[in-house]
């Protein structure tokens, strides 16, 4: 087990957990027409973005320092603590990662995870494993993705983005995600003096190897990742009180993930509350797992589940108990946070209220 003793987050709703929760509670998506670059030649024109063109590494440095302060880490603590990152890789990523760790007073940038939309969850998994095995007493995990012209163009050219700028996870009539700015940092510790946000009890990774872009229709990847997370933590499927799904509102991926949830949590899968908050804060790509860990921690704290926004009508391929109204309480203190990516990578974090 690893405790989340520091947590900082930045989304299109603003800076900090309070801004994120206020945005989620409003049930109003943070989506606006893109002003950061020209989208006139594209099919899609909307994203959930911060004002201007923020610098990702500068924001990550701020978030890491903020989470370390929150966890009460001294300068000596930080100097002994590794940084695990989740980022889209480029030719200078390794050098920038080392510079980021140094500027935050951390020991080193241990690993940079680049597993697309599952990058943050795999980074959290590595840190939790290091802590669980006793290799490290603590680790800082950070990740981010800001909407840029090249990534937007890649998604748009593939015909993936919702052309009307509305993301409708698990809904009939869904036609894709809306990209979003996101960055976050957490401190994970075996023990700590700060009041914890949540506990990472278990984790699971799976690789479907079904198709480079399409999921297995039976959800074998998500089901396998969930089963491994539950088994690692020794938690029965019936104890799960909420699932924060990956669900990007693409027809095949949502249907496959729904099948995986139902299969892994059988016979309780059709009754466990599920929502995808990507409909509100946007799809934050490599930052998704960290942003959605923050969402789950806030749901524990507020004792309210975030809604599955923009839902039009049920889809028989997604037989889930979707959270469609505000004010719904978690059924228990256990939640699953799921993320998947192209290439068949699937991840699951089993989180517990502190």
Image: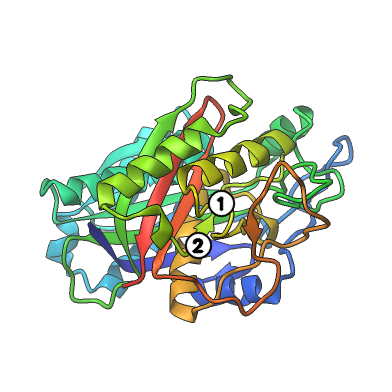
Separation (CA) of disc 2 from disc 1: 9 Å
Q: Which residue is mark 1?
A: 245
Left or right of 275 in this view: 197: left
In what element is the residue under mark 2?
A: strand
Depth check, front residue: 264 or 187: 264
Name which residue lies at 52% across and 50% down: 288
Residue 340 is at least partly visible in this image: yes
Q: Name the quadrant of the N terminus.
A: bottom left
Q: Residue at x 42, y 70 (%)?
A: 332
Res 29 → quadrant: bottom right
Between marks 2 and 1 in the image, the one whose residue lies nearer the viewer = 2
Q: Nearer the viewer, residue 33 or 338?
A: 338
Place of residue 58 in the rendered image (x, y in percent of width and height, measured from the top left): 46, 56
Q: Tell me if I can see residue 9 in this picture.
A: no
User: Does residue 233 sit above or below 306 in this rendering?
Assistant: above
Q: Is residue 13 above or below residue 124?
A: below
Query: Left of 320 or right of it: where is 292?
Result: left
Quadrant where the image shows the C terminus: bottom left
**In the depicted structure, whether residue 99 falls above or below residue 150:** below
Q: Position of residue 235 (x, y in %)?
A: 31, 55
Seen in the image, is 333 located left or right of residue 279?
left
- For the view shown, which residue lies furthest in the front direction? 267
- Is 131 in front, or is 71? 131
- CA neighbours of label 1 inside 10 A, class few (<14), some (14 to 19), many (20+): many
Name the residue tied to disc 2.
Answer: 242
Mark 1 element type: loop
Work out whether 239 lies above or below 43.
Answer: below
Residue positioned 65% across, 65% down in the render = 323
């Amino acid at each position: 087990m690893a405790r989340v003793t520091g947590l900082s987050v930045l989304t299109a709703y603003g800076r900090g957990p309070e801004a994120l929760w206020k945005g989620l509670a409003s049930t109003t998506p943070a989506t606006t027409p893109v002003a950061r670059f020209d989208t006139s030649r594209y099919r899609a024109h909307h994203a959930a973005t911060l004002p201007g063109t923020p610098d990702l590494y500068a924001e990550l440095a701020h978030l890491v320092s903020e989470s370390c302060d929150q966890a009460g880490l001294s300068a000596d603590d930080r100097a002994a603590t590794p940084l695990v990152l989740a980022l889209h890789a480029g030719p200078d990523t390794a050098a920038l990662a080392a510079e980021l760790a140094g500027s935050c007073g951390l020991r080193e940038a241990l690993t940079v995870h680049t597993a697309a939309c599952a990058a943050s969850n795999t980074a959290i998994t590595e840190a939790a494993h290091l802590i669980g095995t006793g290799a490290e007493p603590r680790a800082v995990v950070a990740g981010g993705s800001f909407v840029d012209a090249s990534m937007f163009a890649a998604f748009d050219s593939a015909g993936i983005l919702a052309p009307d700028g509305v993301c409708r996870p698990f809904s009939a009539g869904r036609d894709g995600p809306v990209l979003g700015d996101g960055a976050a940092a957490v401190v994970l510790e075996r023990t700590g003096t700060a009041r914890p946000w949540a506990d990472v009890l278990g984790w699971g990774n799976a690789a479907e190897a079904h198709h480079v872009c399409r999921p297995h229709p039976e959800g074998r990847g998500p089901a396998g990742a969930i089963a491994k997370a539950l088994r690692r933590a020794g938690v029965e499927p019936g104890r799960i009180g909420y699932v924060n799904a990956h669900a990007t509102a693409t027809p095949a991926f949502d249907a496959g993930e729904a099948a995986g949830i139902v299969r892994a949590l059988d016979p309780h899968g059709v009754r466990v509350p599920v929502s995808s908050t990507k409909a509100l804060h946007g799809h934050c790509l490599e930052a998704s797992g960290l942003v959605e860990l923050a969402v789950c921690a806030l749901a524990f704290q507020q004792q309210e589940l975030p809604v599955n926004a923009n839902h039009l009508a049920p889809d028989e391929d997604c037989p889930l108990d979707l959270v469609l109204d505000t004010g719904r309480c978690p059924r228990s203190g256990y939640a699953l946070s799921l993320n998947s990516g192209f290439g068949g990578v699937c991840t699951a974090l089993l989180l517990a209220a502190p």
